[in-house]
Amino acid sequence: MPDIGFDMIAALAAISFFAGFVDSIAGGGGLLTVPALLLAGLSPASAIATNKVQGAFAAASATYTFGRRELINWRKAWGFTAVAFVSGIAGALCVRFLPQSLLQMLIPALLIAIAVYFALSRKVKDEDAHARMTAFAFGATAPVAIGFYDGIFGPGAGSFYMLAFVTLLGYGVVRATAHTKLLNLASNLGSLLLYAATGAVIWPVGLVMAGASFLGAQVGSRLAMRLGSRIIRPLLVLVSAAMALRLLVDPANPWRAILSEGMRGGLSALF
């Protein structure tokens, strides 16, 4: 474990509180906490693994709050939850085999598409709409793919779950957010169990962050239930766009090389 002072622990806790708040409404808190853990001196593997601790606590906090308000259909959701849990484990198992360049290319494009959809679609409301597929078909597809991604990397998984619940099952944004937190919890726990078994989790740091994110998620989930689509929709658009931008500005992202090459080619054609 790296030598982390009290000031850094306090900073990580503050970041985790805000990440838990954002996560409980729109997802994306991992793109705040993972870079913070890297700056604190953790290796990339330990940063991702330790982030799962605070992510699981934030999702559990929001799930508890939404569940108390009876916004989760437990009879339908248990199957989705089990699939997401197993898929999270599978993703964590495969993290070393999947080319990271593929994720770096795909995820920003998907996040931009999600931001555009939630910004422009008139179907995104507090009320439920007509489902486009059965619960069985949904459970066999969306939680499998998104849970797997959550186990491999994680940031953005909440936005993907939200899009799936709204577009495929016709859930209103508040009910979609509630079920998103439940599935986020499941896939986070699945991958966390595997990371913990390999010794990659830095528990003292993870538990401090988990406590702060738990409190942040309490505030965020209560605000989401009170304001509904008035806060969920704009924050989801903002967070999805910010996550895409954050990934695109990473010097290691393949899009940087593609765009740079295109610009050089355009300038050479002009001059």
Image (tube, rainbow, N blue to C red):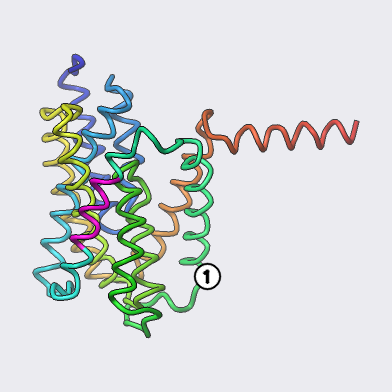
Report the magenta residues as a range.
81-90
Mark 1 residue type: Leu
Percent position (x, y) of residue 83?
23, 60
Number of marks in the rendered image: 1
Looking at this view, is 249 or 48 the one in front?
48
**Quadrant (top left/top right/bottom left/bottom right) for the N terminus:** top left
Magenta span: chief secondary structure: helix
What residue do we see at 32% from left, 76% from top? 172
Name the residue tied to disc 1.
120
Quadrant placement of the C terminus: top right
Residue 208, x across and y down, in percent:
12, 34
Rendered view: 38 above or below 13: above
| Circle 1 Cα neighbour tier, 10 Å, few/some/many (<14 / 14–19 / ≥20) | few
As for residue 83 lying within the magenta part, the answer is: yes
Q: Quadrant of residue 136?
A: bottom left
Give residue 122's position: percent from left, percent from top. 48, 78
* Membership of 106 in magenta stretch: no
Q: Quadrant of residue 82?
A: bottom left
Asked if residue 190 lies left or right of residue 159, the reply is left
| Residue 123 in sight in this render | yes
Q: What residue do we see at 44% from left, 46% from top?
A: 243
